[in-house]
Image: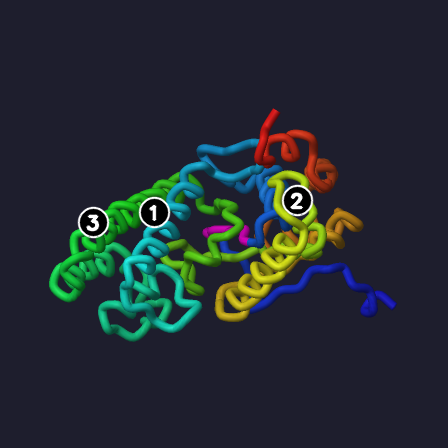
Amino acid sequence: MHDLQNHGTAIINPAPCGVEATIIVLGAPRSGTSMVSKALNTMGIPMGMFMDDAVFEDRQIAGIVTELDDIAKRLKALGTPQPPAGKRFSERMLAMMGHEIAKPAEQIQRSIAIVRALVKDMRTATKPQNDDDRAALAERGEVVLKKLNQFVSRSNESNRKWGFKRPSAYETFTPDLTPFRNPRLIVPFRDPVAIAMRNVISMEFKLMPALGLAIEQTRRLAAFVQSTKVPVLLVSYEKALLDPAHFVTATAEFCGVELNEVIRRTVSATIANGDETYLQQSRLNKT
């Protein structure tokens, strides 16, 4: 009978977690990433040096990812020739230079060189009326990618095992998750109706557009998970709420963390559906 039980967790690309690893929490917005990040932090995995305690997200990495995504969107708006749909930021950079996507091992630490080459390419190959805008965006991209590499280097020096949460980063990062050290993903999935209703309540969305958005975000997230080769722990948000003990055990094992009974109970106690601080701080009109 035990084999027939559905605990709501599954592992893709299984591999033991070493002493050094980066635990990355991705997911559709409002899908339970804050709960996962809080649990990891309580287990003893540092989830940020500049933590927003309401949503358990590092403000610095959140800002970096937001800037990268903004640059990619602005380049697209300027009419930059685009590779096939679904390419992420650094894949776009490579495609614009006429290169094939490198193997993961060959792609490590190449982000800055990619953008520098892009700057040179844009100055010689773009339409005159948009050349300055494109070059400025590419130079801004170089600065932001330096920030990313510096952030990763500092985090690696400070902790052998650390992590961060950024729900929509699957829209920006490449599937091999350059330049993170030994990356491992934890990806919660949540009922799209619940996600939509949270956006209706907190963000003043209309229900049906919110539901369509939640379904589309979940589809893109699943496509990203399918494309990556790094270890991934899939988590049902609803099942985690129903069985916190299993969620905590599965997460600790995936991250290579040993928990004593006191810490296990402490972590289990954090598994809840949106505490008061989260509900107040994650709304459009905060009180």
Q: At label 2, which amino acid type do we have?
A: Val
Given this view, does label 2 or label 3 mark the residue nearer the observer? 2
Q: The C terminus is located in which quarter?
A: top right
Seen at 69% across and 47% down, the residue is 197
SS for dot 3: helix
Q: Which residues are magenta?
A: 20-26
Type of colouring:
rainbow
Task: Please tell me in which quadrant of the rendered image residue 44 appears.
Answer: top right
Q: Is residue 251 magenta?
A: no
Residue underneath mark 2: 200
Q: What secondary structure prevails in the magenta region? A: strand
Front-lying residue, 60 or 45:
60
Q: Please tell me how crowded label 3 is: few (under 14), some (14-19), or many (20+) other residues with Cα within 10 Å.
A: some
What numbered label is drawn on residue 148?
A: 1
SS for dot 1: helix
Seen at 20% across and 49% down, the residue is 136
Of all residues, the one furthest to the top in this rendering is 287
Residue underneath mark 3: 136
x, y percent for residue 142: 24, 50
Q: Earlier in the sequence, mark 1 or mark 3?
A: 3
Q: The N terminus is located in which quarter?
A: bottom right
Q: At label 1, which amino acid type do we have?
A: Leu
- Residue 65 is left or right of residue 130, and the answer is right
Q: At label 3, which amino acid type do we have?
A: Ala
Seen at 26% across and 68% down, the residue is 96
Given this view, does label 1 or label 2 mark the residue nearer the observer? 2
Front-lying residue, 114 or 183:
114
Q: Earlier in the sequence, mark 1 or mark 2?
A: 1
**Can residue 109 be seen here?**
no
